[in-house]
Image: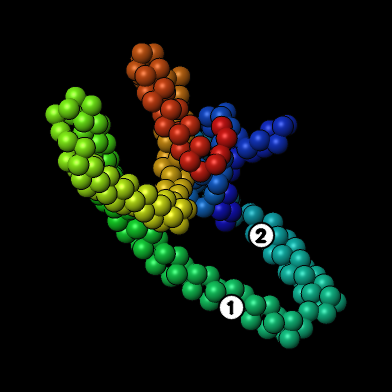
Amino acid sequence: MSSICPYLYRDREGRFRCEVTGNAVDPGLMPCLFNFKECPFYVSATKAQAKPAVEAPPESAPTATVAVEGVVERVLEEGVKAAEERGIEEEVVEEVSRMIKAAEELAVNLNEKWKEYEDNARRLVKMWEETSMSARHALEAISSAIELYEKIIENLETLLKSGRISEKAYEELKSEAQSNLEKYKSLKNDLESSFKNAERLVIPHIQRVKVAEARPELGKLRLSLMKLEQMYKEGKVSRETYERLKKELESRIRWLEQLVGETA
């Protein structure tokens, strides 16, 4: 039995289309392959085309059955003969089977490693969200301290010019404030540098996780949009509701398409 939806076809431009809805579809993201029996459009179309069971042929039909069996036997014999003429040997079959087995084992191994990677990457996403928040708060506190000491130095200069403090007191207080100012500036530069270096390594993993999560959602949203359009055509939703939901779905779809690097 074919694993491809019988209602999937290519138009003259080479685009895939659904025969039930007439819309262009992406078989890789829609349930047109393997899971097409779960698609509501396939189910509805199948029910509509269902016909009563054909009555059993009269008893006078055995001759036709025998003739068909004879044709099948000849086809099988010709197939075996053709295979023998092509020289298919057991060694070749064994080698192909070995290659298939090796590929299967590698795929299983990769699946296990990919699952482990995804689990660790999701933990990294959560960890980085907390780390980013803490880093922002720390940088804000350091920036406030820098502004404070810059203001102190500015005020000291004002006091000196007005004669309210002596030159000696001014130099001592300014030296202390300048030392603290340089310390906080150095802390800020070090923290920003380490944050950017870590972010450069973390972001690619976060993007992979987001893309992996976005693809299934993108397929569901596209299917929802097709259902909405079908319901509107059938008069099951008002134009106002249709326009509002369509706008929301298309906006979310465009965002996910940008995330996974697709174009509409």
- For label 2, the SS is helix
Q: Which residue carries the number 1 mark?
A: 101
Q: Tell me if mark 1 has few (under 14), some (14-19) or many (20+) residues whose alpha carbon lies within 10 angstroms of its own.
A: few
Q: Residue 160: which numbered mark, if any? A: none
* Amino acid residing under circle 1: Lys
Q: Which residue carries the number 2 mark?
A: 65
Residue 123 visible in this rendered orientation of the protein: yes
Residue 53 % position (x, y):
49, 44
Task: Determine whether 103 is above or below 139 in the image.
Answer: below
- For label 1, the SS is helix
Task: Determine whether 87 is above or below 147 in the image.
Answer: below
Q: Nearer the viewer, residue 172 or 76?
A: 172
Residue pictured at 23% horizontal, 42% vertical: 171
Q: Nearer the viewer, residue 165 or 138?
A: 165
Quadrant for the C terminus in the image? top right
Residue pictured at 49% horizontal, 74% vertical: 109
Q: Nearer the viewer, residue 223 or 127?
A: 127
Residue 182 % position (x, y):
31, 48
Mark 1 and mark 2: span between their CA atoms? 41 Å
Image quarter of residue 100? bottom right
Residue 52 visible in this rendered orientation of the protein: no
Q: Nearer the viewer, mark 1 or mark 2?
A: 1
Q: Residue reaching furthest bottom?
A: 91
Residue pictured at 77% horizontal, 70% vertical: 79
Residue 166 % position (x, y):
17, 36
Q: Is residue 163 left or right of residue 228?
A: left
* Amino acid residing under circle 2: Thr
Task: Determine whether 99 is above or below 209 in the image.
Answer: below
